[in-house]
Amino acid sequence: DVKVTQSSRYLVKRTGEKVFLECVQDMDHENMFWYRQDPGLGLRLIYFSYDVKMKEKGDIPEGYSVSREKKERFSLILESASTNQTSMYLCASTPGGQNNQPQHFGDGTRLSIL
Amino acid sequence: AQKVTQAQTEISVVEKEDVTLDCVYETRDTTYYLFWYKQPPSGELVFLIRRNSFDEQNEISGRYSWNFQKSTSSFNFTITASQVVDSAVYFCALSAPGAGNMLTFGGGTRLMVKP
């Protein structure tokens, strides 16, 4: 079974802090994704990565950056956290290629910025 | 641009009732894939089904069934004889070849099944 693990289920940070959300997958997947989930808006893609050291902007990248130094790990970084970044963050992964395989999701990190 | 609309934000039913969750999509691609995911209170999204645009056959899996109609750009999900454990948020999503497995999600429908 694919396992996508997010480092924290709940996180509370202060405005202006630099925040790191970590995601690790154990199935050697090439593609990894970061979403944020807000009520009524569904999941919106922040960034994704096709391979190590590669990244692409999603629909809402402003205020975020990512890092993929190893294949299994994809980090989301809030450079200077703001209250409007309070949200649920979900990481996902799929095998490489254009095969439209289902994404496998982590349990999510509920982030509060005070 | 792709878009997925789930017009029902919340549905409440009593156990054993049948319930249908609506999903309407927009895309200019001729080849695409549609997905349904379930998000229970624990938070993790659980994959339920994938359907490609060339396969309009309806699918049934136990109490779950899906009705894909290309003519109306809809991919509706029906739960028969609902149970309390079906309470969750359900998401419909769309992806297109060449998009690197990127998904466009609908806003989700929260289903509450009362005993």
Image (cartoon, coloured by chain):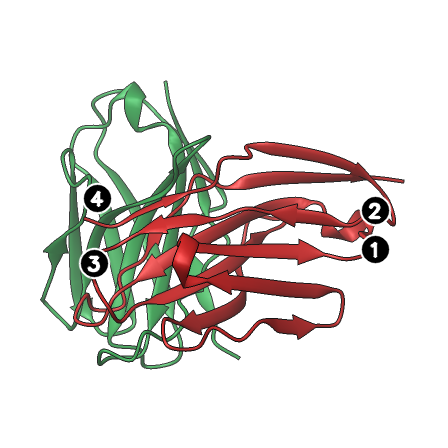
Chain colours: A green, B red
Q: Which residue is mark 3?
A: A48
Residue type at the position of mark 4? Ile
Q: Is residue B99 visible in this depiction of the protein?
A: yes
Instruction: Determine the chain carrying the residue at label 1.
Output: B
Q: Amino acid at mark 2?
A: Glu
Disc 3/disc 2 C-alpha distance (Å): 40 Å
**Residue B51: image x %, image y %?**
45, 71
Where does the image place residue B66, in percent across and percent down from the top left?
Answer: 59, 64
Q: Secondary structure at mark 1?
A: loop
Q: What residue does disc 1 label?
A: B81
Pick the quarter of the image with the C terminus of chain B: top right
Residue B76 found in image quarter: bottom right
Q: Residue B17 — which label?
A: 2
Q: Pick whichever of labels 3 and 4 is earlier in the sequence.
A: 3
Residue A74 percent location from the top left of the image: 26, 61
State how far apart marks 3 and 4 are (Cα): 13 Å
The answer as to whether the residues below labels 2 and 1 share one chain is yes
At label 4, counting other C-alpha atoms closer than 10 Å, the crowd grade (few under 14, some 14-19, many 20 or more) is some
**Which mark is on residue A77?**
4
Q: Is residue A16 above or below residue B40?
A: above
**Quarter location, residue A103:** bottom left
Identify the element where label 4 is drawn.
strand
The amino acid marked with disc number 3 is: Phe
- Amino acid on which the number 1 mark rests in the picture: Ala
**Element on which disc 3 rests:** strand
Please tell me which residue is depicted at 16% across the width and 57% down the height of the picture.
A67
Q: Disc 4 is attached to a residue of which chain?
A: A
